[in-house]
Image: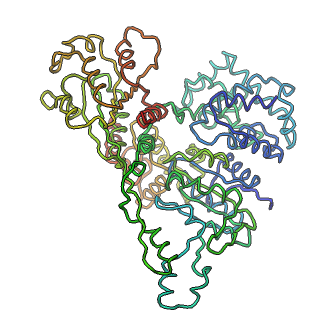
Amino acid sequence: MAETNFTGSKHYIAAPELMQAVNVAIELEKPLLIKGEPGTGKTMLAEAIREATGKELFIWNIKSTTKAQDGLYVYDTIQRLYDSQFGEEGVDDIAHYIKLGKLGEAFKSEEQVILLIDEIDKADLEFPNDLLWELDRMEFYIHETKETVKAKHRPIVIITSNAEKELPDAFLRRCIFHYIDFPDREQMTEIVNAHFEHLEEHLLQQAMDTFYWIRGLKDIRKKPSTSELIDWIRALQLGGIEPDLIRKEMPFLGVLIKKDEDLGVIKQRRLD
Amino acid sequence: MFLTFFYLLRSKGIDVSVTEWLTLIEALDKGLCHGSFTEFYYLCRMTLVNRESDFDKFDLAFGEYFKGIQDENEIPPEIMKWLDKGDMDDSQLNRDVYRFEQHRDSNTVKRMFRERITEQNSEHNGGNYWIGTSGGSAFGHTGRNPGGIRVGGTPGMHTAFSVMGERKYESFRNDRALSMRQFQVAFRRLRQYSARLDVAKTELDIDRTIDSTCNQGGYLKLEFEKPRKNTVKLLLLFDCGGTMYPFMELCNNLFQAVHKANHFKDVQTYYFHNCIYQKVYKTPECETGDWVDLDYLFRHFDKDYKVIIVGDAQMAPEELFDVNGNYRGPNGGMSGYEWCQLLNSKYKKIVWLNPRYHGGLNALSWMESEHELAKLFHMYLLSVDGLKEAITYLMAPR
């Protein structure tokens, strides 16, 4: 196994315990399950690992209709039916109609790759269970062609989840688990600075004060997240807002807060 | 023996399996904790615990297992061997442990630390028993971020004891009250597909039709399956009395979750004030006149409706037992308790979710009503675990 030591990347600031989790998962060749609040950079982690290791990244986006089979391969029966009716060539070769999914592609790759299974909890409750064997053994069997696809190099598997559904125990047991905490002020400063070339310190501090103040309000329903903070700072910067007015006037609040009720709460609190 | 840690975790309700334990051992054998006690803590956590709701339990167990350690001789030899592998700074481990112990026991340091907190900004979540851990300040390290100090040897990493001492994962515990999404997730369990029932196969199964047709070389062959529809019908009764006010948001979340979960065959919601009497209200404001008879519910919603009552059961005993107990509306000649009994007899499955539920503790006088109602209905705490239990009961065949 290649000696890989993940230490974050230029645009991705990872907490030390997250880096440790990534390295442990790589070393133990187990899938890394990442959970955390929206906007804590779960998906970006895979991108950062790609950048840090130079390995190819395969992203499998999970939707509510995704089935485990889709990730392995799809047998395009309809195409074959059409082709047979028009007497196309190659109809007798079933392999023609086997299309590999993301997992299949990752397995087939000549070099070790990174496989991101994004938002696994979006799929059906049973979905993770259907992948147990494939992720354990890193191989699957194509019934139609009687072929076994086996990974030459075990991919680095990163799985993200928003905790919409409880994942099955059997699946969880096979993963290294990490929960991304919401970044504290210090980390957040690093993260924001990684996104901006020149950011006025005063503006940043004022924006951060307001941001953490809002997050600290008990009656906020949807707390603003990292990506919203970055958008907001960008808006403040472009709008040429006087930093000292940020805390008092909170311009462009719509960038930060997406719910009407929350805007109401903030207005009220500001008056207090 | 280190193995006792495994059993300690299990006894604390963390469902660690042998697979996970072996993963940890493998990781330790590979020296992945790099000789640092803090990394050892994270390594244990990432391999043994697989949901954030268990972090708090894990922290407590980890603290319990390792807190007694005064110097390295007492650390189980297996761990010491693993910790030895890297370039472990011996003194650091001792320092961590020492600091932890020192602050746990010493009131002086705690007091100093409290004083320090007041000087710092208010973002500090103080008042925690373990807060002493952060008082590295007493040793000249000023905590740069609230709630934890950074130790020189491992830059940027919270020390193990300070991390678990913060108990910042407490709010993720399953037995805490829950958020809207968690409610929704819980409600997804409330399904009963009619496919399990014996009905005719009436729905065209396109995937299987295509496969069968292809297998027959293009001759169309239709395949049917049983329709899968959720047959669960819900009747919700919310308490809108004054004592429920602190739980308004919680109830609102529950309400929203039920309505967003559009997989139920039918959902009906009514409201009551303190206790269920002859009338239930159509709106949460519980205005006189804007009501229907309880009898109306019985007539319109059959016994298969699953009834969820949300309330804190904090009515005064006379409100529950006196035939004139209802001071806002008609009593209908029966006490609240009798109305509840009637309700209970009309539906097969009823649960009562109580945000204040004291769980069968000996009835103190002010809990008498709760105690009596808990005998009548299946009462659960309004929390993730409580709701799951309640739903399990609702879904149980009989």
Q: Pick the residue in front: A38 or B340.
A: B340
- Say which quarter of the image contains residue A173: top right
Q: Is residue A4 left or right of residue B378?
A: right
Q: Pick the residue in front: B349 or A156.
A: B349
- Say which quarter of the image contains residue B383: top left
Q: Is residue B221 left or right of residue A133?
A: left
Whether residue A271 appears in this view of the structure is yes
Give coordinates of residue B277: x percent, y percent: 22, 22
Give coordinates of residue B211: x percent, y percent: 50, 72
Whether residue A251 appears in this view of the structure is no
Q: Is residue B351 above or below residue B229?
A: above
Q: How is the image coloured?
A: rainbow
- Say which quarter of the image contains residue A140: bottom right
Give coordinates of residue A35: x percent, y percent: 57, 48
Residue occupying image coordinates x 36% and y 20%? B376
The quarter of the rendered structure image containing the N terminus of chain A is bottom right
Q: Is residue B28 left or right of residue A56?
A: right
